[in-house]
Image: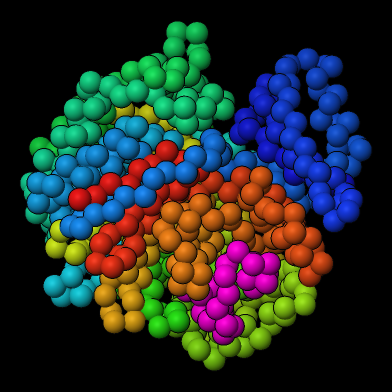
Amino acid sequence: MGISKCVSSTRDPFSRDIELHLQLPAWGHRHLEVFVSMRLLRGITQRLILPLILVLGLIPVGAEANPQPEAASGFEPRPVAVGERFMAVTAHPLATRAAVDILTRGGSAVDAAIAAQLVLNLVEPQSSGIGGGGFLLHYDRPSGRITVYDGRETAPARARPDRFLQADGSPLPFREAVTSGLAVGVPGLVAMLWQAHQAHGRLPWATLFQPAITLAESGFAVTPRLNRLLGLEADLPRNPAARALYYDAEGHPLAVGSRLANPALAATLRRIAADGPAAFYQGELAQAMVEAVQTAQRPGDLSREDLAGYRVQVREALCAPYRGHRVCVPPPPAGGPTVLQILGLLERFPPLDPRTPLAVHRFTEAARLAYADRAHFLADPAYAAVPVEQLLAADYLAARAALIRDETSLRQASPGTLSASPARAVPADGRGGTTHISMVDAEGNAAALTSSIEDAFGSRILVGGFLLNNQLTDFAFRPQVDGRPVANRVEAGKRPLSAMSPALVFDPEGRLYAILGSPGGSRIIHYVARAIVALIDGGLPAGEVVALPHVGSRNGPTELERGHAPPELVDDLRARGHEIMFSDMTSGLALIVRQGGRWVGAADPRREGMAAGE
C-alpha cells in the first residue's frame, strides 16, 4: 500500500485539515484511489490518529510531508484568448485587465507587466509584491535584443554563513527561519521595474500605478483561493497589521466575496509613483522596513544602508537550441541553466508525445541529471565560479544523456565531472510563493516576469500594506558539507539561488514563438521545461499545454501530480524502477504562443489567472 500526505503549513497540524491519498495495491492492473479528509481537532483522542497511521506504515519514506506554500485550490480550465495585436496573461483577472488597459493605451509590454505586478501585490499577496524580487526577461523586437533584469533579493551587509545555525551548530527549523527577520533580504522588485521602465517604458511611470492604487482604495472581492490560503495560515494572523487587514474580528479569514481594501498599500504606491524608487529605498518607508525586521520575534539585520545600496543586475540572456527553435532564459542565480539542460538532454532522443509513459520516463530522468548538476554547481556567479558553458556544452550533454536508459530509472543521479570547476555540494532551494506574468505588446516586444516573496505570505511581516520576503531561506542553511564550503551559502550582498525561469522561445525562422513562465518553488524548472516540450515535441495547443498533468524529479522520487496521474502511467514507471511520490504540483503557467499570425494566451487551471488580448 502506498500513501502520500499533505499537511497544512502550521506548527500545530492537529488543528488543520490533513488530506490522505491512499493508493491501494493493484488488482487486475487497476488501482483504487481513496481520498480521506479529516478535521483533526485539538485533544488527546485526535492526537492518536496520525501516530497510528505512522505505526501502521501507511506513510512511506519519501512521501510529501509538507504542501507547497501555495497549495492547490482546485482545477478549473480557463478559456484561451486570441489577439491580433497584443496579449496579456497573469495570475488574476484584475491584473490581466489592468495590463490590457495599459496595452490598449499604447503602453509597452514592460508598462503592462508593471501595472499587472502592482495589482497582483494587492490581490495575490501570498505570492509576490514590492517586498520581494524577481527576474524580468525582455525582448526588443526592432533590435532583436534580449535582456535580463535581475531583481533578486540580496543578503544584508551583516549577513554571515552561520545565519541559520543554532547554538549547537544544527540548522534552525525551517518554519522558524521563514517567519523571522533573519529571512528578509533586500527587496529588488521596485528597482528592477524602474530600471526596465527607464529602458523600455512608453507611458509615464506614475500612470502604471493608478490601477493598483484605485483598487487598493476601493477594495476588491476576496477570491476562494485567497480565502482558503488565509485559512491555512497559522503565522500571518500573529502580525497585528496583517490580522487587521486579512481577518475579521473573530480571527476568521475574510469571507469569499467580501471587500478587501488596503489603504496603506495605496499610500505606499502613491509615494513610489510620485518619487520613483527613492521613495522605497530611502526615507520613511525604508526606515519602517528596517524597524519591522530588526524588531521581529527573531530579529534580522536589514539596514537603511542595505536598502539604499541595492543595485539591479542587467545580464545577457542564456539561449540554447532545441529541435530547431531557440530557447532563452535568465542565467544564474535564476533557474535557466537547468531548464536548458533538461531540454539539451531530451534533444538527444527522438521527439515523443509528452503524455506517453516513455516520454515521462525520459523527462524525469533528464530532470534527475539536471537537478544533480544544479545542486552541485549553481549559485550567485558573483560569489562562485559557475560553469554554465560547460554544463550546456554539446559533448557534456551527450555524455550525460547516455546515462538515460529506457528500461530502468537512475532513481538518483550523481553530478557530472567538470575539470574547470571545483566540486561542491549545494542543497536545492526550498518552496516559493511566486507569480508569473507574460506580455506581448502591439509592436511585438515581449516581457516575461517571474516574481516572488518566497514562502506564501513571505516572512509574514507587513509594512506599508505589503509583505516582506523571506528569500534568504533560499540559501543553504549549512555553510559546509563534508568540510567543503557550499556555493549557495549565506554571504553579505549575495543573491540566493533561485528556480525562477521566465522563458522566451523563437521559431526556426527566428520569430518570437512563445512567452512563458510559472511559479512553483523549486519545481518551476519542471513546469517551464515540460511546457516547452509539450509545445515543440507534442505540438499541443496552448490550453492543453498549461493543463498537462505535471511530472518531474528533483533528483529524488519521481513526482506525479496528485489526482492527475493515469494508473497505466504509474504502472509503467514502477515497472521501470521509479519510486513514485504524489504531490500537489501547483504551477501557475502563463503562456502566450504565436499561431498563424495571432497571439494565443492561456492561464493555468490550477490558479485563478486569465488571458486577454486584442
Magenta residues, dominant SS class: helix
Looking at the image, can residue 161 be seen?
no
Residue in view at x 48 percent, y 56 percent = 544
Q: In the displayed structure, would residue 218 be above or below residue 273?
A: above
Residue toward you, 272 or 261: 261
> Outermost residue, bottom direction?
395
Q: In the displayed structure, would residue 5 be above or below residue 593?
A: above
Q: Is residue 183 left or right of residue 150?
A: right
Q: Is residue 371 left or right of residue 95?
A: right
Residue toward you, 328 or 453: 328
| Region in magenta | 338-362
Residue in view at x 58 percent, y 59 percent = 428
Residue in view at x 11 percent, y 40 percent = 207
Asked if the magenta segment contains residue 606, the reply would be no
Residue toward you, 302 or 414: 414
Residue 592: percent from left, percent from top: 33, 58
Looking at the image, can residue 412 be seen?
yes
Q: In the displayed structure, would residue 349 be above or below residue 239?
A: below
Residue 496: percent from left, percent from top: 46, 57
> Outermost residue, top direction?
249
Residue in view at x 58 percent, y 88 percent = 398
Q: Is residue 608 left or right of residue 81?
A: right
Residue 147: percent from left, percent from top: 26, 68
Asked if the magenta segment contains residue 358, the reply would be yes
Residue 181: percent from left, percent from top: 46, 37
